[in-house]
Amino acid sequence: MHRLARRDRTVPGEVLRARYGRFTPRLRFEKLRRLLDRRGVPLVEIPEYPGNAPYYRTFWQPDSLTAVSFVAERGAHSTPALLRAGDVYGVHAPVTAREVETRRERA
C-alpha cells in the first residue's frame, strides 16, 4: 500500500490494474474499516511490534488471517514521507493466531 503513494504507474502491476482498475495513492484506515464493518468483517486490534510503536497500529481479521497496518503518528525517520497519519501502510497475510498470541505475550 505504501508504494502506491509514489504514484508509480507500474505499481501495483499490470495484472491487478487490468482486473481492478485505477488505484488511489492513499487509503484511509477509517474508510477501509467502515467498508469492512458494513460487510460484517470485524477487525481486532493487536499489539504493535515495539520498534514500530507508536508510529503504527495493526488490526487483524481472524477469518482471513490478514492484518492491516496504518500510520498512527507521523515520525520523521519512522514513517514514509508520502503517507499521513491515518493512511494504510500495508496489508499482511497470513498472520496466524499464533503470531497474534506471540504479539500479545510480548506486549
Image (cartoon, helix red, strand yellow):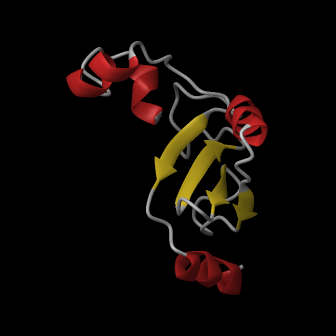
Q: How many marks?
A: 0
Q: Position of residue 59 (x, y in %)?
A: 67, 55
Quadrant of the rendered structure where residue 104 is?
A: bottom right
Instruction: Establish if 72 lies above or below 38.
Output: below
Image point 72% across, 42% down: which residue? Answer: 73
Q: Position of residue 94 (x, y in %)?
A: 44, 64
Q: Position of residue 8 (x, y in %)?
A: 31, 17
Image point 55% across, 83% down: which residue? Answer: 98
In this orientation, which residue lies closer to the viewer: 11 or 48?
A: 11
Instruction: Establish if 50 lies above or below 13.
Output: below
Image point 47% across, 54% down: which residue? Answer: 92
Q: Looking at this rendering, what residue extends furthest in the bottom direction?
A: 105
Q: Looking at this rendering, what residue extends furthest in the front direction?
A: 39
In this orientation, which residue lies closer to the viewer: 41 or 90?
A: 41
Q: Is residue 101 left or right of residue 73?
A: left
Q: Is residue 10 left or right of residue 4?
A: left
Image point 46% across, 23% down: which residue? Answer: 5
Quadrant of the rendered structure where residue 28 is?
A: top right
Q: Is residue 75 left or right of residue 95?
A: right
Quadrant of the rendered structure where residue 102 is?
A: bottom right
Q: Position of residue 30 (x, y in %)?
A: 75, 34
Position of the C terminus, as image quadrant, is: bottom right
